Amino acid sequence: MTNKNKSFPLIIFILLIVVIFLSLNITVRLLLPSLKFDMTTSQKYSLSPSSQKILSSLTSPVQIKLYLSNALTQENPAYANYAQFVTRYLRKYQQIAGADKIKIEIIDPKPFSSAEEDAKKAGIKALSDTSGQSNLYFGAVISNALGKSAVIPNFIAARSGYLENDISRILAKINTGSHKNIGLVSPQLPLITHAYGQSIPNWAIVAQIQNDYNIIELSDRISQIPTNIDVLLVINITKLSPLFAYALDQYVLRGGKLIIISDIYSEKKAADKGKLSAFTANLNPLFKNWGFSIPQDKIVGDRNLGELTQINTSIGPQTKNYPYWLLLNPEQINQDNSATQGLNQIRFKSSGMIVPKDDNTQIKFTPLLTTTSHANWSNSDSFIKQDQAELENKFKEGNEQYILGAEIEGKFFSSFSKNILAGTPSEKKLPPYLPYSIAPGKIIILADSDFIVAENWADTSSTPNNPVYGLAPIYDNGSLLLRLLDYLTGKEDVLGLHNSEPFNIKTVGENIYSQTFNKYANAYSQAQFELNQRQLLAQTYAKATQQVFTPLTAQQIKEVENNKQRILELQQEINKLAYLIKEENIQKLSQITDYNIIYIPLLTIFLILIIYLIIQKRAQKRIGEIANELRSN
Amino acid sequence: MLTDSLTILKKEFGSYFRTPTAYIIIGVYLVISMFSTFYSAYFFMNNNTNLISFFSYQPEVLTILIPALTMKLWSDERRSGTIEFILTQPISYNSIILGKFSAAVLFGLLLLVLTSPFIIYVSFLIKLDWINIASGYIGALLTIVVLTAIGCLISSFNNNAVLAYLFSVFSCWLLTSLNYDFILLPLFNLSENITYRLSQSLNFYHNYQDFIQGEPGLDNLTYFLSLTVLILWLNRLAIDYKKQ
C-alpha cells in the first residue's frame, strides 16, 4: 500500500470525527438551549414566575430592536459589560418564549446611517462619546404585530436590577393594550406640574405611573368620583371639604379602590413652604368608619431603623442616627402580602402612625409596613419648634411597634346620614346615597408622603431625557407605590416582578474613594458649613452697605475684612482637603495595583520555591538514607 | 492505564520544577494576569462583583503561557530520541498522552489557584459574588484544558520546542480570538435564529463568556470537552502516524 493510499482513509476518518464534533455541538445547542445554570448569587438570569407567565400569555409575536453602537462598547468598558448583560437577558426572554414569539434584532446605528435615523425616530436617545459627540446609542424598541410598541430610550447600568421588571412590564403592557385609569387627587404636592415643558425630576414617580396607567387629575372639591376611575390615589389633602369627604365615602361604599397617603408632617412641604405648612387635613372622621385612625399629633421614631445622616449641631455637622428617618427592611415590610412581597428597603421620613380599631369584625385590617418593637413617638408640635439635633437628642427608645402602612378590606358604614346635596338642585346629579357598602371596598393607607419624593429614593440624574428608564432607584419606594397600584387594579401578572439586585453596587474605585472621603468628611463638612455661614454674613454686610448709606465704622470695616480673610482661608482649606482626598485616593489605587502586580506574585514565587526546596531536601535525605541502608546491607 | 498515566503525570509535573521554567511561568502569568486586570480591563471602573476584569483577559493570557508548558512535552522526546523508547514500553499510548496532558493541566490549575490571594484581597474591597466567580474559574480551567490539548498536539508534530511554542500560540490565538461568524453569514438569510445559535455554539468567545457571566450550560461544557477529546484524539493519531 502506498503512503497516499494509507493517508486517504485517515483523512476521511478525521473529517468524520470533525463532523461528529460539529454535529454534537450544534445538536446540544439547538435541542437543549434551556439547560443553563444560573451561577449567580442573586439568580439574575432566572426569570421570575411572573415574567414566565407574561411570556406564556403573549398573544402576538414581539419584535425587539436593540440599538447598540459598537463604538460605545469599545470605548466604555462599563457599557460593554452592561450591553452584554442586556443582550443576554433579551435572549433569555426569547429562549423561554420561543423564537417564533420573540424576535431580536441587534442594530449598530452608525453615524449618519439610516439605522441612526430609525433609532432617532423611534425615540432612542443618543449618548455622548469621549469627544463629546452625541452619536452613540443603547436603547430598545419593543413592538408587537398588533402595532403596539414601547421604547427604552437608554439602558442605564444603575437600573440593572430592574431590567426584568422593565422588559416584562413592557411585554405585559403591549400585550394587553388598554391602560387602567388612576384618579389622582394631590392638591398639596405639585405632582403633575411641568416646568418649561419638562417634568420636574422630583416627581419622577408620576412618570413611572404614567408609563403603565392613565392618570386623571381630580380636584379635592368634587362631590363624586368618576365611574371610569379604577383606583383613586389621594395624596396629602390640606383641607377636607365636606363634598369631597362625601365623594370618598360613597366611592368606597360602592366597592371603590383607594390609596390614601396622609402625612402628619410632610418634610418636603416643610422644606418648600415652611414648617407651618407641613401639616395635612385630619381625615379621621372618614377613617373611623373604615376601621382605623391616624393620631394627628404623633410622629414615629425608631432608633433601630434610624438613618445615619449629617445633622447640623452647635459644633458643626455631625453624623448621627436620626430616628425619624426610617429605613424599613424586609422584616418591617409584609412579605406575605402580594402587594409588598419582595420589597427590600423603603425609606420613610417623619411618618405618622396608623391605629386600627379593635371593635370592627367586618373589616380585615392587614399591616403592610411597621416599625420594630422598640419604636416611640414625638409630638408633631416639637417638629416645628425644634431642629433635627434637638429632636435626635431628645428621642427615647420605646417598646411599641407602630403601623406605617396598612390594607383595609371589607364593607363599611357611611360617615354621612344622607346625600350631602339633599334638598339642593344638584341632588339628582349624584348617584343615590348609600348608607352601607354594596360591595367590599379596598383601602390602602400610608402615613408618610415623603416616600414618593424622588430625591428620597432614586438617582434622577439621567431622567431629563429618559424619565422612566433613566431613573436609578436606591430604595424600593417607587416600586411600593407602583405595586400597590398594580395590586388594586388587579394586574396580578406584574406583581411578582421586583428588583433582583442589591441597591447601590459600587465599583472598587468608588468604594476606595468613599473610604478616603469619609476620612476627611467631618473636616470637609465643617469647613463647608463655616464657609456657607461666612458667605451669608458677607452677603448681609454687602446688602447693609447698599441699603444704608451711612459709612461703616472702623470696627465694622475690620469685621468685614476679617470675614473676607476667613472666607479665603476656608476656600483654601476646602481646596486643600479636596486635593488631599484626590492624592490619597490615587495613592491607595496605585498601592492596590502595586501589591497585586508586583508584591503578591513575587511572594507567591518565593513561597513555591521554598516549598519545592523543602520537598527536594527531604527527597535527597530519603535517597541518602536508602543508599546508606543498601550500603550497610 | 490510570496508574501509568499517574506515573507519567508525576514525572512530567515534577520536571517543570526542576528547571526555572515553572517559576518564570508562574511569575509571568501572575504579572500579566494582574496587569491586564488592572490596566486593560479597567478593574477600578467596572462592577467587579464577578471579577469580570480578571476573567475577561484570561484566554489571551493563557494563550501565551499554556504553550510554554506544553512545548517540550513531545518535542523534547522527539529531539532526544526518547520517543521511540517510550513508545516501545508496555504502556498504552493513551496513558502516555493522558499523563503528559494531565501534568500540563495540573500546572494550569496551579496557576489559577495562585490567583487566590488576589481574590481574597478584592473580597476586602467589595462584596463578591462567589458563585459567579466559581463559574468563572470553571471557564478558565476549561480554557486551560483546551489550550493544553492544542499545545500537546502541536508539540507532537515538532522536534523544535521553540517552533512548537510559536505554532501553539498561533493555534490557540486562532481559537480564542478569531470570530468565525463570517463563515456562517450565508446561512443568515435562511434562519437568523439558527445562525445565531450556530455562531454561539462554535465560537470560543461566546462559550467562555457564558461561564464568566455566570450562565454556563450543557452546551458550553459539551463545546469545551468535545473539543478537548477531538484534539487529544488527533494527538493520538499523530503519535500513531509517527510510529509508522
Image (cartoon, rainbow, N blue to C red):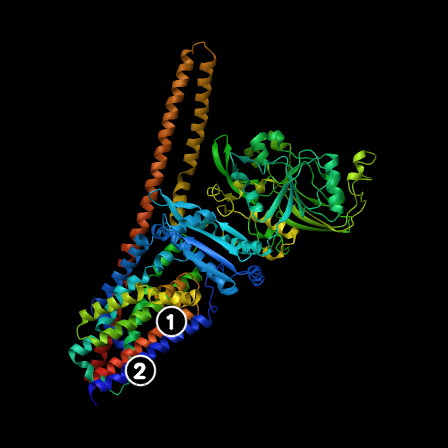
Residue count near mark 1 (Cα–Cα under 10 Å), binned few <14, some 14–19, many ≥20: many
- Residue B223: give its label: 1
Expressed as whole percent of the image width and height from the top left, the position of residue B4 reads 30, 82
Which of A159 and A572 lies nearest the eye of the viewer?
A159
Expressed as whole percent of the image width and height from the top left, the position of residue A107 reads 41, 55
- Residue A13: give its label: 2
Q: Image quadrant of residue B87?
A: bottom left
- For the residues carrying marks 2 and 1, which lies nearer the camera in this image? 2
**Amino acid type of the residue tagged 1 in the rendering:** Tyr
**Amino acid type of the residue tagged 2 in the rendering:** Phe
Placement of the C terminus of chain A among the 4 image quadrants: bottom left
What is the C-alpha distance between the residues marked 2 and 1? 20 Å
Identify the residue at horizontal 43%, vertical 36% (top origin). Answer: A522
Helix, strand or loop at disc 2?
helix
Q: Left or right: A229 with respect to B24?
A: right
Q: Kindly indicate whether the residues beneath marks 2 and 1 are on one polypeptide chain.
A: no
Task: Answer yes or no: is residue A506 visible.
Answer: no
Q: Left or right: A60 with respect to A39?
A: right
Expressed as whole percent of the image width and height from the top left, the position of residue B230 reads 33, 76
Helix, strand or loop at disc 1?
helix
Identify the residue at horizontal 47%, vertical 20% (top origin). Answer: A540
Q: Is residue A498 above or below residue B161?
A: above
Q: Are marks 2 and 1 in contact (CB under 8 Å)?
A: no
